[in-house]
Amino acid sequence: MIVAGLAGVIFLQHSIDSSSASRASWREAAPLSAGQSVLDLLGGVRQALAAWIWTKTDTVFHAYGINLYENKSMYPYYKLVTSLDPRFTMAYYFASYMLFRLGKPEQGYALALEGLRNNPTSSLLQRNLAEIYLFFKKDPRKAKYHCERALAYASDEKDIVSTNSLLSLINQVLEGKKKIPDLISKEYMEKAGQHHHQEEGEYCPECEREKHGE
């Protein structure tokens, strides 16, 4: 019931935001402004619910060692988080990439772009798009552009190290020194969270996501 109610709020807010009347006379419409204030208040509830859903899914992921790139049941919850709180970058980061791994590249790409439109200065989502361009779209030039944007916005030391590692790989691909690596196998090694790497120290987008899910 809570989710259904909040879905109604999202639809109502979208209708108000997209209406020509609201765009033309936003400041002059006192009732509309009052309605927007109510929606802003409800927005806090939406954000709190998004955080709660994320915490629950994260608990399930760690408790049961679910492979996110094979388990379709986790995706709807991540997508719901992005609908409730478009500023929740981590949900976009996982959900868009997951769609590519589940064989739905068009939806994954659209969600990655949506996340970046809502969070244009997010280093995490810039790197996410760089990984998508490199590993799925095989376009290292566009991957480099977004990787450099990720570096420009990065403030966390771990993000800087990871992004520099990805940029190094992209540059080697562009220089013809290395081919674009195949994605890591979906099957886990005997130890949870460890993947079959072709080379020692090879950049692994799945491992990067596991680090963010710690």
Image: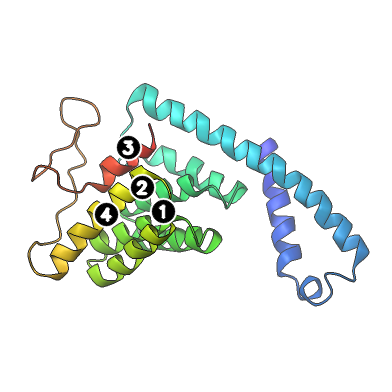
Q: Nearer the viewer, residue 144 or 189?
A: 144
Residue for badge 1: 154
One can see residue 38 in this view: yes
Quarter of the C terminus within the rendering: top left
Q: Are marks 1 and 2 in contact (CB under 8 Å)?
A: yes
Near mark 4 (Cα within 10 A), the count class, few <14, some 14-19 or many ≥20, is: some
Estimate the x, y position of residue 163 in percent, counting from the top left: 30, 53
Amino acid type, mark 3: Glu
Q: Nearer the viewer, residue 68 or 24?
A: 24
Separation (CA) of disc 1 from disc 3: 19 Å
Quarter of the N terminus within the rendering: top right
Of the two numbered discs 3 and 4 on the same chain, state the one appearing first in sequence: 4
Which of the 4 image quadrants contains residue 105?
bottom left
Estimate the x, y position of residue 157 in percent, counting from the top left: 36, 44
**Is label 1 in a helix, a strand or a loop?**
loop
Q: Nearer the viewer, residue 74 or 159?
A: 159
Of the two numbered discs 1 and 2 on the same chain, state the one appearing first in sequence: 1
One can see residue 139 in this view: no
Separation (CA) of disc 2 from disc 4: 8 Å
Separation (CA) of disc 1 from disc 4: 11 Å
Separation (CA) of disc 2 from disc 3: 13 Å
Amino acid type, mark 2: Asp
**Lateral position of residue 168 relative to residue 3, left or right:** left
Which numbered marker is on residue 164? 4
Estimate the x, y position of residue 139 in percent, counting from the top left: 24, 69
Q: Give the residue drawn at x 48%, y 43%.
A: 78
Separation (CA) of disc 3 from disc 4: 18 Å
Residue for badge 3: 210
Q: Nearer the viewer, mark 2 or mark 3?
A: 2
